[in-house]
C-alpha cells in the first residue's frame, strides 16, 4: 500500500510522522489524520526529489507520493 508507518496519536502532539513511499515510480496514497493540519516533508529518504505539488501532495486524509519520492511527513 505504500504506507509503512505512522503514529495515530493525540492530534495535539507534534510527533506524528507518516512514511510514504512511491515504489516503481508509482503513485501511492498514505493515511493522514487531517486533524494534524497540513503535512510537511520532514525527511526525504529517496534519491529522487520530493517536491510538493509535483512528486508529493496532500488531500484531506491522505498524503500522496509519485515518481519515486519516498519521505517522512509530519505536521506543520
Image: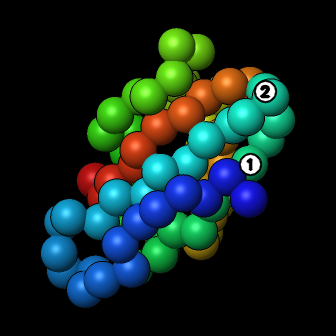
Left or right of residue 8, residue 21 in this image:
right
Q: Residue furthest bottom?
A: 10
**Residue at position x 17%, y 75% in the image:** 13
Q: CA distance from mark 1 to mark 2?
A: 9 Å
Is 46 displayed left or right of 12 in the figure?
right
Taking 68 as reference, is 6 left or right? Answer: left
Q: Is residue 62 left or right of residue 17?
A: right
Identify the residue at image location x=41%, y=28%. 44
Question: Where is mark 1, residue-wise?
Answer: 28
| Label 1 CA crowd tier, 10 Å (few <14, some 14–19, many 20+) | many
Q: Residues within 10 Å of mark 2 (few under 14, many from 20)?
A: some
In depth, the one of 59 and 31 nearer the eye is 31
21 is higher (above) or lower (below) than 48: below
Q: Is residue 58 visible?
A: no
User: Which residue shows up at 29% across the image and 66% down it?
Assistant: 16
Identify the disc placed on residue 25: 2
| Quarter of the N terminus within the rendering | bottom right
Secondary element type, mark 1? strand
Label 2 residue SS: helix
Answer with the quarter of the image where residue 69 lies: top right
Give the label on residue 51, or none. none
Give coordinates of residue 59: x percent, y percent: 64, 60
Compared with 22, 47 (above or below) is above
9 and 35: which one is in front? 9
Residue 38 location, x and y as percent? 42, 58
Q: Is 12 in front, or is 29? A: 29
Residue 37 placed where, x, y %? 38, 67
Q: Position of residue 54 (x, y in %)?
A: 66, 27
Amino acid at each position: 500500500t505504500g504506507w509503512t508507518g505512522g503514529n495515530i496519536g493525540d492530534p495535539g502532539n507534534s510527533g506524528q510522522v507518516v512514511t510514504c513511499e512511491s515504489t516503481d515510480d508509482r503513485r501511492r496514497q498514505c493515511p493522514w489524520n487531517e486533524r494534524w493540519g497540513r503535512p510537511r516533508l520532514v525527511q526525504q529518504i529517496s534519491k529522487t526529489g520530493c517536491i510538493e505539488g509535483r512528486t508529493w501532495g496532500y488531500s484531506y486524509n491522505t498524503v500522496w507520493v509519485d515518481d519515486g519520492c519516498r519521505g517522512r511527513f509530519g505536521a506543520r
